[in-house]
Amino acid sequence: QQQVKQSPQSLIVQKGGISIINCAYENTAFDYFPWYQQFPGKGPALLIAIRPDVSEKKEGRFTISFNKSAKQFSLHIMDSQPGDSATYFCAAQRSGSARQLTFGSGTQLTVLP
Amino acid sequence: GAGVSQTPSNKVTEKGKYVELRCDPISGHTALYWYRQSLGQGPEFLIYFQGTGAADDSGLPNDRFFAVRPEGSVSTLKIQRTERGDSAVYLCASSSGTGAHEQYFGPGTRLTVT
């Protein structure tokens, strides 16, 4: 059972454009929602994260929008740059002591120069 | 400071062999996680350590997989009788402690079973 659904699978954006990646979750026990950026041959790097008590969080060019009632959240990358080309994973973390992450299937972003 | 390190970066083994993968977490981090990432997929949880004990091993696919963390720092993931389906990137992450949110990943070990 896929608990975190991510779309689109791939995304091509022109330099300077806005990249939008969407995720939906099912389990209401999730209480922390990070986004990770992964370059080929590297491990995932924590990009930005949000808790469900806020609807939006912005860090530089990256913004998370969160809709608790719809159980959906999205990543917006403003002024996308070729260096942003990578695979992006949303994730959800279960409340409690273990806090293992459940990941989406990933979005391969390509920003054209 | 130093991040999470994993060795080896690549491991090629024959079907049926035994392998060990090592993870060295961020200094002072008491929580350690192992994930497995298949090609084109997101990482999948395998096991979680808090200190020396495996607090949650619900993600281990079968009893061929085992992990230890004897001194509460370095962890070793052990796979017996490897199968071709075990081929994947094995990722380690660490976190500062019980209930902490942020997990920081290492570069992974790419395991190929021939």
Image: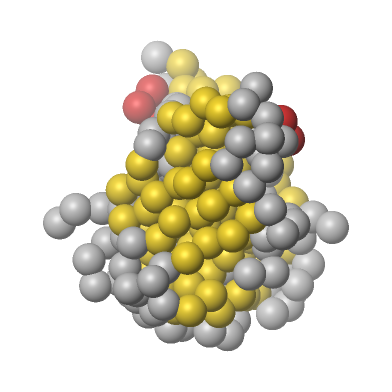
Q: Tell me if residue B89 can be seen.
A: yes
Residue drawn 47% across the image and 23% down it: A111
Q: Is residue B85 left or right of residue A39?
A: right
Q: In which quarter of the image is the C terminus of chain A?
A: top left
User: Which residue sits at x=57%, y=42%?
Assistant: B18
Number of numbered discs overlaid on the protein picture: 0
Residue A98 picture location, percent across and down: 55, 78
Q: Which residue is drawn at 40% across and 50% down?
A: B22
For the residue pair A83 and B26, the one nearer the viewer reads as B26
Q: Position of residue A88 (x, y in %)?
A: 53, 41
Seen in the picture, residue B23 relative to A20 is either above or below; the reply is below
User: Residue reaching furthest left?
Assistant: B1
As drawn, which residue projects farthest toward the top? A113
In the rendered image, residue B97, in percent from the top left (x then y), is placed at: 37, 79
Quarter of the image with the N terminus of chain A in it: bottom right
Q: Which of A26 and B73 is in front in this view?
A: B73
Q: In which quarter of the image is residue A3?
A: bottom right
